[in-house]
Image (tube, grey):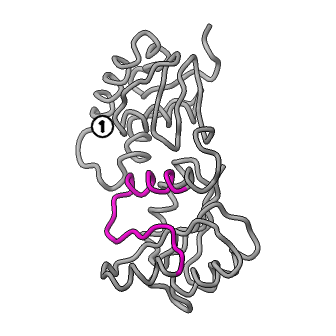
Amino acid sequence: MYKILVVEDDPAIQALLYDFLEEASYGVVLAGDGMEALAKYETQEFDLVLLDVMLPKLDGFGVCRAIRRTSKVPVMMLTALDGEESQIRGLDLEADDYITKPFSMPVLIRKIAALLRRTSGKGETGRRLSYCGLHLDLDGYKADLDGSRVDLTPREFEILRELLLHKGRILTRQNLLQSLWKYDFFGEERIVDTHIKNLRKKLGSAGNFIETIRGVGYRIDREVKK
């Protein structure tokens, strides 16, 4: 599992980042200011640092500068400062990417996955889930079934990922809405049923392993069916 240090002083953004990264199967350690970030960085090993620029005690530029004295760990900077000068300053400090606020969480997750693929040396052998001939590439958001690519939308992929990560457990529609739609969702729980229906159609007969638990939700059995 990749481990990410998230350095962000806004509690709401910090909590949102934690939830999204944890659900994407990353290990997450939080820091609320620059000095706390360096203290945690010096005592633990991380695969990536997600670093806000505007921080108490020591700003993100200072944190990045300190990290770069001893490490080439990937650093992705987050900031509301969208001016060219700020971006150049971050890149001059050898930050690997620079994301301006507000940003899309799904896009951020994909950018993190892409950066880790480029820098980890794991290439296409990164994190995968497999079940009954179905394989999910969690970093590349790709799915294949019996060797053939399955064209899933990002939301279909995420629903399938959640069901596979929780094999044997019934996930209610509300579980899925809270995990995947977060604060972006306004509407009926039945939207989950529509995505499940489309997912089963794309998977063909293999989609039968997604069980409907009437009146409750959906489940993929823990045991692989023969």
> Vertically, is 60 above or below 103?
below
User: Does residue 35 belong to the magenta stretch?
Assistant: no
Q: What amino acid does circle 1 point to?
A: Glu
Residue bearing mark 1: 189
Question: Residue reaching furthest left?
Answer: 187
Callout 1: helix, strand or loop?
Answer: loop
Question: Viewer-proximal residue, 183 or 2?
Answer: 2
> Vertically, is 165 above or below 97?
above
Dividing the picture into quadrants, the one containing residue 16 is bottom left
Query: Which residue shows up at 59% across the image and 35% down it?
Result: 128
List x then y, in percent, for residue 113: 51, 51
Question: Viewer-proximal residue, 66 or 18?
Answer: 66
Question: Residue reaching furthest right?
Answer: 43
Query: Which residue shows up at 44% across the image and 51% down it?
Result: 110
Query: Which residue shows up at 34% across the image and 35% down it?
Result: 153
List x then y, in percent, for residue 106: 38, 52
How many badges with numbers are in the image? 1
Query: Which residue shows up at 57% across the image and 47% down it?
Result: 25
10 Å neighbourhood of mark 1: few (<14), some, or many (≥20)? some
List x then y, in percent, for residue 162: 50, 37
List x then y, in percent, for residue 136: 52, 32
**From which residue to which does the magenta span run?**
93-115
Position of the C terminus, as image quadrant, is top right
Dividing the picture into quadrants, the one containing residue 197 is top left
